[in-house]
Amino acid sequence: MSASAPAISVQDVRFAYGERQALNGLTFDVKDGEIFGLLGPNGGGKSTLFRILSTLLPLQQGAAQVGGFDLASQQAMVRQILGVTFQSPSLDRKLTVQENLKHQGHLYGLRGADLQSRIGLGLERLGVADRRRELVSKLSGGLQRRVEIAKSLLHRPRLLLLDEPSTGLDPGARIELWKYLRELRQEMALTIVVTTHLLDEAEDCDRLGILHEGQMVALDTPDALRSSVGGDCLTIRSREPERLAVDITAQFGVTVHRVGDQLRIEREGGHDLLRDVVSQFGTAITSVTLGKPTLEDVFVQRTGKQFW
């Protein structure tokens, strides 16, 4: 793979389960050496795309290359350069940490001193070398996740795919996990692709693709995506949101987005608008908040729907 070639390239990929369209014309690239996030609510298409990239589902329509290999015709080559950590735990809880990695190594034809060296280095990198003789069942969720990643890196892949890596982790373990991911990217020159429905986790990615109903509705760095919303975000709750939206638009000439029982307004100098709206329609408002744009605001702006 040349220095300028993308680590992953996806062109017009579509996938359907019967009549339900799970992916609808996805086109994007993942740059070599970046941490790329796929963000979206459940049902957005993340898991389907993950299964296709990890060769668990076939390409139905479109084309994709992973590490320069064609995903449709060179799956064996793709699997050699991929490390995959699934959302569901894949460790045998009745075996020790070292035994889990040893059996994983055997699947890749690794044996003897080379395998032991790789196990030791992998556990050291992930900060779990002192737990190698412990049963997996005795480890915390965060430590088990680290062992899962060490297992997926045993054959020294060029790309690491992580499906909802923070599932079941408390906030402290999640922060620690991301610290290790950034260190691994640096030490091993890895490209990392992460699927997530957690907005704060998505902030840690170099670039982010936001999926909704099988389509890529936004793609850029987290900072650039937030900046694309512009200004401040005013969020208003009301018992009569539809009527209030009409009244605010008529009074102030602003665009009001109705999202469920919320009204959202994007505008520079939002504090002035907040004061005027509360002064004019205070009796119709049950709560109001003002803040800088978030990734959730990006999702709302691009889809007109809340991020569930």
Image (tube, helix red, strand yellow):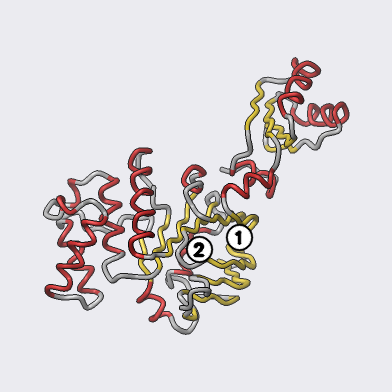
> Which mark is on residue 136?
none
Q: Which of 19 and 54 is in front in this view?
A: 54
Mark 2 sits on what residue? 48
Question: Residue, x 59% and y 71% (percent of image)?
Answer: 13
Residue type, label 2: Thr
Q: Nearer the viewer, residue 284 or 190?
A: 190
Q: Nearer the viewer, residue 82 or 261?
A: 82
Is residue 303 positioned above or below 270 on the image?
below
**Image position, residue 92 (x, y; %):** 21, 58
Asked whether the beta carbons under mark 2 and mark 1 sit within 8 Å of each other, the answer is: yes
Dividing the image into 4 quarters, which one contains the C terminus?
A: top right
| Mark positioned earlier in the residue sequence (2 or 1) | 2
Mark 1 sits on what residue? 214
**Image position, residue 65 (x, y; %):** 51, 76
Q: Residues within 10 Å of mark 2 (few under 14, many from 20)?
A: some
Q: How crowded is mark 1: few (under 14 residues within 10 Å), some or many (20 or more)?
A: many
Judge left or right: residue 290 versus residue 121.
right
Query: Quadrant of residue 289 in the image?
Result: top right
Question: Residue, x 47% and y 80% (percent of image)?
Answer: 69
Question: Residue, x 33% and y 51% (percent of image)?
Answer: 180
Is residue 156 positioned above or below 267 on the image?
below
